[in-house]
Image: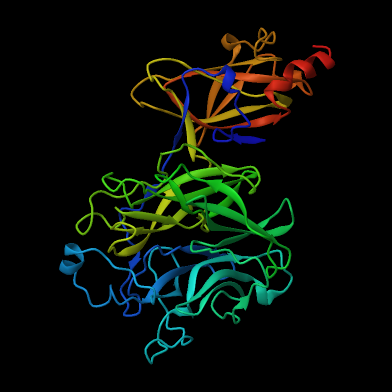
């Protein structure tokens, strides 16, 4: 089994020293970013964008679905000088729509003329639907109906005529059915409405958003047929006015869910981050309840500067779930805006490269001192044990030792003391840990591991181990088993 350090089930917080969690941001593609921006007449304001970037392995093509304003009188026709001199005044008659772009290499993007939706007398545009807000798109390998290989959920928002939730289906991601309204439980959903398949429950899940107790929060709904959805239930709440969850696309990784939560800062107009949007990492064993990995640490840092001269992503970050390309590279595509959320801004698509499993690491609070990481109770199942780590300072020596215990407060198991552990680098950042007597001698027994290290940050542990219960029950279980 493999356990990431961000998985709070793995570590025993009572038995740790000089350690804290630190998010590892993906590396922005400085050569190619931004990949595309709002450069078509109907792309009057991309705004949040809510990107859905998918890689279709059958067609070997990247597809991007993004929300934009195709009518916005306070933006259209304004010059950059005018936008810099006054505040943006959003109008209730703005029209949101869904647009489509595609790419063979994930870098160079085309906005094809779909000849589907008429915009001011012309269908030569890349618009899929008018009046579609916060659309989420998924590829579905579980549905036997080939005509529903692609699925979407969107909020239909027609100015002056109300809103409702709807779904649509497509065999190829470009030719879509008409929108089908939800029969019941329509949430406000003015956010990124992201659907995905829950393997554990065998159903579709939708993450959306509602307002409750004066703040925004993420909700979850379930469906067996993608048309009838359950009543939304809260799954993540932010931290007061200053850190509200605006949207949260998620992806499934290593038997858990990871979220890319866009966090909007309100509550203090004098604050430097007011009305800007950061992106933070969240995690969950089940999508029913998410938690923040490292509150306040951006996983995709905003760019430098401010509107209108700052970097293209200095104001707001809205991410898509990561995609794996044909070469097993993990990419996060995101919409970066160069201004405040409720003011003028121009928005662009960009990407950043993440190394698999290197999402968040345990690092020392005091780098000059040793760190102690202790696992919760596990079952030993063989000889293999490795950690994914990297030196904090490549110019300094690293130190890594491991010790095994039946209970973390008891003496080490004979033959598995720190001084008898041997460490070997196996490549790609993995360090193998062995003892002369061999961990296979403990096959079937329960215990825990202690890692004593210096000048290292640790992302993950893998090997012939499996978590087996919680630390608070160790004593009772050990007594029952005769330890």
373 shown above or below 300 = above
Residue 1 horizontal side relative to residue 267, left or right: right
Q: Observer-nearest residue: 300 or 55?
A: 300
Q: Quadrant of residue 141?
A: bottom right
The answer to which of 407 and 276 lies nearer the viewer is 276
| Quadrant of the image occupied by residue 367 | top left
Please report the residue visible at 65 percent of the width from the left and 44 percent of the height from the top. 255
What residue appears at the point 48 percent right and 33 percent down from the top-left corner? 361
Can residue 207 be seen in this snapshot?
yes
Q: Can residue 103 be seen?
A: no
Please state the horizontal and vertical placement of residue 278, each as a whole percent of the image.
38, 48
Q: Position of residue 217 (x, y in %)?
A: 52, 51
450 lies left or right of 142:
left
Q: Residue furthest bottom?
A: 121
Toward the front, the furthest residue is 213
The correct choice, above or below, for 453 with respect to 417 in the image is: below
Q: Residue at x 57, y 22 (%)?
A: 13
Q: Is residue 197 above or below residue 412?
A: below
Question: In terms of depth relative to the viewer, which is nearer, 397 or 248?
Answer: 248
Instruction: Report x, y in % for residue 272.
Output: 27, 45
Tally of numbered discs: 0
The scheme the figure's colours follow is rainbow
The residue sitting at 51% across, 49% down in the picture is 213
Quarter of the picture holding the N terminus: top right
Figure check: 83 above or below 312: below
Q: Quadrant of the C terminus?
A: top right
Q: Left or right of 394: which side holds 220?
A: right
């Amino acid at each position: 089994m493999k356990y990431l350090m961000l998985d709070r089930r793995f570590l025993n917080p009572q038995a740790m020293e000089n350690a804290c969690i630190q998010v590892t941001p993906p590396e922005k593609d400085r050569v190619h970013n931004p990949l595309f921006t709002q450069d078509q007449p109907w792309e009057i304001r991309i705004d949040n964008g809510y990107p859905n970037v998918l890689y279709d392995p059958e067609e070997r093509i990247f597809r991007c679905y993004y929300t934009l304003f195709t009518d916005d009188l306070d933006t259209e026709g304004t010059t950059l000088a005018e936008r810099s001199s006054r505040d943006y005044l959003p109008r209730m008659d703005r029209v949101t729509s869904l647009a489509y772009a595609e790419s063979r290499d994930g870098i160079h993007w085309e906005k094809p003329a779909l000849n589907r939706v008429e915009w001011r007398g012309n269908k030569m545009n890349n618009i899929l639907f008018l009046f579609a807000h916060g659309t989420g798109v998924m590829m579905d390998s579980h549905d036997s109906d080939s005509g529903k290989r692609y699925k979407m959920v969107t909020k239909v928002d027609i100015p002056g005529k109300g809103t409702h939730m709807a779904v649509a289906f497509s065999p190829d991601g470009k030719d879509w059915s008409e929108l089908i309204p939800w029969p019941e439980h329509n949430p406000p959903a003015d956010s990124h409405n992201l659907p995905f398949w829950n393997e554990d429950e065998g159903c579709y899940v939708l993450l959306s958003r509602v307002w409750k107790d004066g703040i925004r929060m993420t909700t979850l709904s379930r469906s067996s047929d993608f048309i009838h959805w359950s009543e939304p239930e809260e799954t993540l709440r932010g931290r007061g006015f200053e850190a509200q969850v605006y949207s949260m696309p998620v992806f499934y990784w290593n038997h858990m869910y990871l979220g890319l939560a866009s966090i909007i800062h309100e509550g203090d107009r004098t604050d430097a981050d007011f009305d800007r949007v950061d992106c933070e990492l969240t995690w969950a064993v089940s999508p029913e309840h998410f938690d923040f990995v490292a509150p306040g640490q951006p996983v995709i840092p905003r760019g430098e500067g401010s509107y209108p001269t700052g970097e293209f992503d200095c104001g707001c970050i809205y991410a898509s779930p990561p995609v794996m390309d044909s070469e097993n590279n993990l990419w996060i595509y995101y919409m970066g805006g160069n201004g405040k959320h409720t003011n003028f801004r121009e928005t662009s698509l960009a990407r950043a490269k993440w190394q698999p499993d290197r999402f968040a690491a345990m690092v020392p609070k005091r780098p000059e001192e040793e760190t102690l990481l202790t696992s919760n109770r596990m079952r030993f199942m063989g000889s293999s044990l490795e950690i994914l780590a990297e030196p904090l300072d490549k110019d300094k020596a690293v130190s890594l030792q491991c010790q095994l215990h039946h209970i973390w407060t008891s003496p080490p198991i004979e033959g598995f003391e720190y001084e008898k552990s041997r460490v070997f680098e196996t490549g790609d950042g993995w360090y193998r840990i062995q003892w002369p007597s061999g961990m296979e001698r403990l096959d079937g027994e329960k215990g825990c591991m202690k890692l004593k290290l210096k000048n290292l940050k640790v992302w993950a542990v893998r090997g012939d181990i499996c978590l087996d219960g919680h630390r608070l029950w160790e004593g009772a279980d050990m007594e029952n088993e005769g330890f």
